Image: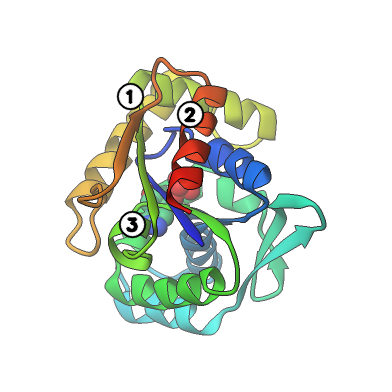
Amino acid sequence: MIVAIDGPSGAGKSSVSVEVARELGFACLDTGAMYRSVAWQAVHDGIALDDAQRLGEIARTYEIAFAHEPGNPKPVGVSIGGVDVTQAIRTAEIDRAVSPVSAEPSVREALVAQQQRIGRSGDYVVEGRDIGTVVFPEAPVKVFLTASNEARAQRRVLQNEQRGVGSTDFEEVLADIIRRDEYDSSRAASPLRPADDAVHIDSSDMTIEEVIAQICDLVRERS
Ligand code: DC
């Protein structure tokens, strides 16, 4: 079974997905990490971020792999072409590079096919931007998770502090979130938008436990 969780960056998708997966005994698939891995490879190889052909080649040829630990729904690492990029894909440089890379249709086509293959292999909570609309339109539970710009920036700063990577400057993070939302929502290929049958949850004034409980209730109702 697939639980699709879409929404803008910083809405809490990652933390919520892991805990929902833990509670339900599912695994997690972070599709943003896959777009970030392709962006990292492009930057590493010195490829122009508007070189559609080379970006598509990277997405089609390099293997993206998640490292799993028994009993932990959250992968402990991600690699592309055998290189561990778990930390490297969370830098401000990759935050900027990932928008043009993820707007490229040939990149999306290759990664969506991989995501569908992974998701069909078991029970997954899948988080991203187009999971309910494009990747798994048949998912029985689709959530569109949002929060105010300020709440999202505040959470991203805390997350970056905890990870020890990425910007911890509130204004810089806020500006990046707004810029990425605009880019992700206005791009031609699979723009960020809720599926018609998605349940909207605004997490600005909710605790993470409340969001998790609401999603788990939805899954139990529909399974
Ligand atoms: O969730 P995230 O911030 O790690 O995602 C990184 C970027 O990848 C984000 O700018 C949007 C893009 N993305 C996407 O276009 N489609 C997805 N399914 C997941 C992420």
Nearest to viewer (mark 1 / mark 3): 3
Q: CA distance from mark 1 to mark 3?
A: 22 Å
Q: Position of residue 211 (x, y in %)?
A: 48, 29
Local crowd size for mark 3, using a 10 Å CA cut-off: few (<14), some (14–19), many (≥20) = many
* Image side of residue 130 versus residue 83, left or right: left
Local crowd size for mark 2, using a 10 Å CA cut-off: few (<14), some (14–19), many (≥20) = many
The yes-or-no answer for disc 2 within 8 Å of ligand 1 is: no
Question: Eyeballing the image, is 81 above or below 162?
Answer: below
Query: Which residue occupies 64% across, 76% down?
Result: 81
Q: Position of residue 4 (x, y in %)?
A: 42, 53
Residue where numbered disc 1 is placed:
149
Residue where numbered disc 3 is placed:
132
In primary-sequence order, the first of circles 1 and 3 is 3
Tell me which corner region of the image, top left, top right, bottom left or bottom right, holds residue 18: top right
The yes-or-no answer for disc 1 within 8 Å of ligand 1 is: no
- The secondary element bearing badge 1 is classed as helix
Residue where numbered disc 2 is placed:
211
Residue 129 in view here: yes
